[in-house]
Amino acid sequence: MSERICITGGAGFVGRLLAREFYNRHDVLVLDRLDFGINRFRPEELSRFELSRTDLRDAAGVAAALDRFAPDVIVHLAAAHFIPLCERAPGSAVETNVVGTANLLMACPPNCRFVFASSGAVYAPSQALHDESRSEIGPREVYGFTKLQGEQYVRYFAKLRGIASVVVRLFNVVGPGETNPHLLPEIVAQMKSGHTQVALGNLWPKRDYIHVHDAAAGFAAVALNGTVQAGETVTVNLGTAKQYSVEEMIAKLRSVSGYPLAVRHDPGRARAVDRPFLGAVIKEIWSRFGWAPRLTVDDAIRDLWRDPDLSDDLAERLGLAPSAMSLLPSCA
C-alpha cells in the first residue's frame, strides 16, 4: 500500500538513501535546509519526490508544509550531529535538535507514525552492549543531551496528541555519502589526496559501526512495519551488536585499500568526552519491525573506499576537490 512519507534531513547521509528506498513506491516529501546542496540527488531523481527547503526551527514553515502534504509517516532524521561542532555551538545544536523536533511534533497529524532518529549517545558509558529496556541513560556530551531531550518531547507529545511514535537509537553509520568530517571519511579523503600519515586522537574507543545502507533499511522497516498504537512510544536500537576500535578500523582500511598509512597519535585531537565502548543490543528492532543488518563493517569500508561520494561541501572542508576522489585505484 502506498503511503505519504515525509523525511526530514532527506538530503543527508542516511536520508538520501531512505528517500531512494521510498520514492518509487510511495509519495515522498523531503524537508531539508539543503546545507549540502540540491546536487545530493541526481537531476532525474528530483521529479520522483517533492523537495522543500525548510528549516525545522521555523515552526510556521514546518506546520504549513505538513498541513499541505498530510503525511502518514514522518521519519525525522534532520539534526546537528557532528559532535565537535555541537560542543563548539551548543545553542545551535539545541535549536536544531530540540526546538526543531518540538516544532515537528506540534505539526504532526494525530494519525501519523512519527519515527525519531535518536542516538546511542544517550546511554551512560558501559562495557556491556546497550539494551533499550535495561541500560542506564546518561549522555556525556551536548549531542547526546539534545537527543535525550528530543526523546522526551517525542514521548510527551505522543501521549498528548495521540501520535504513534518510535524512537530509534542509531549507532555509528559508515559508508559512502558522508556529509560531516567523521573519522573514516576524513582519513579516506586524506589517503586519496596522497597522504601517507594521519594524526589521530584516541585509538582505543570501540564503536558499533553500521553500514549506511543497513541504517536506511532499518528506518524503512520501522517506518512501515509492525504495529505501534496511537499514543505509544516504542524504543529500539539500530546497530549491529558488534564493536571495533579505531585501531581495528584503520587496519581494515589499510587491508581494503592496499595503501600504506602510518598513524601518529596526537593528544590534542583526543576527545575529553570519549567513552570506551558503545554498542547495541538489536533484538527489539527485529522482534518489533523485522529488521536485522545484512552488511558488515568490511562491506562499509570497502564501499567507502571504492566510492566515497562525499558531499561537495565536505570534500571542500577536507581540502579535496571532488574530482580528486578517484586519484588512487579502487579496491577490486
Image (cartoon, rainbow, N blue to C red):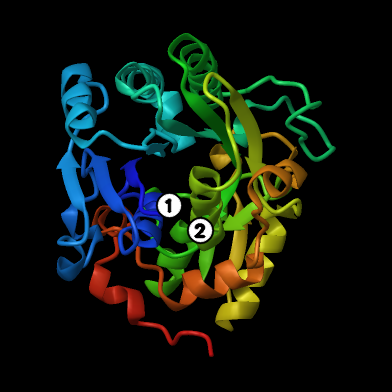
Q: Residue at x 21, y 30 (%)?
A: 55
Q: Residue 73's x, y, as percent?
A: 39, 38
Dot 1: element: helix
Task: Farthest residue to the bottom: give it.
Answer: 332
Q: Residues within 10 Å of mark 1 (few under 14, many from 20)?
A: many
From where the camera sits, is residue 9 visible? no
User: In this picture, is 323 found above or below 162?
Assistant: below
In the shown orientation, is residue 162 left or right of residue 121?
Answer: left
Q: Residue 189's x, y, as percent?
A: 41, 65
Q: Residue at x 70, y 58 (%)?
A: 247
Q: Please report contact status of discs 2 and 1: CB closer than 8 Å, yes or no.
A: yes
> Which one is in front, 167 or 37?
167
> Which one is in front, 259 or 115?
115
User: In this picture, is 304 found above or below 98?
Assistant: below
Which of the 4 quarters of the picture holds residue 106? top left
In the shown orientation, is residue 201 left or right of residue 142?
Answer: right
Q: Which residue is mark 1?
A: 14
In the shown orientation, is residue 285 left or right of residue 221?
Answer: right
- CA distance for labels 2 and 1: 6 Å
Amino acid under disc 1:
Val
From where the camera sits, is residue 53 visible? yes
> Which one is in front, 47 or 127?
47
User: In this picture, is 45 found above or below 63?
Assistant: below
Dot 2: element: helix
Q: Residue at x 26, y 27 (%)?
A: 56
Amino acid under disc 2:
Val
> Which one is in front, 258 or 243?
243
Which of the 4 quarters of the picture holds residue 280? top right
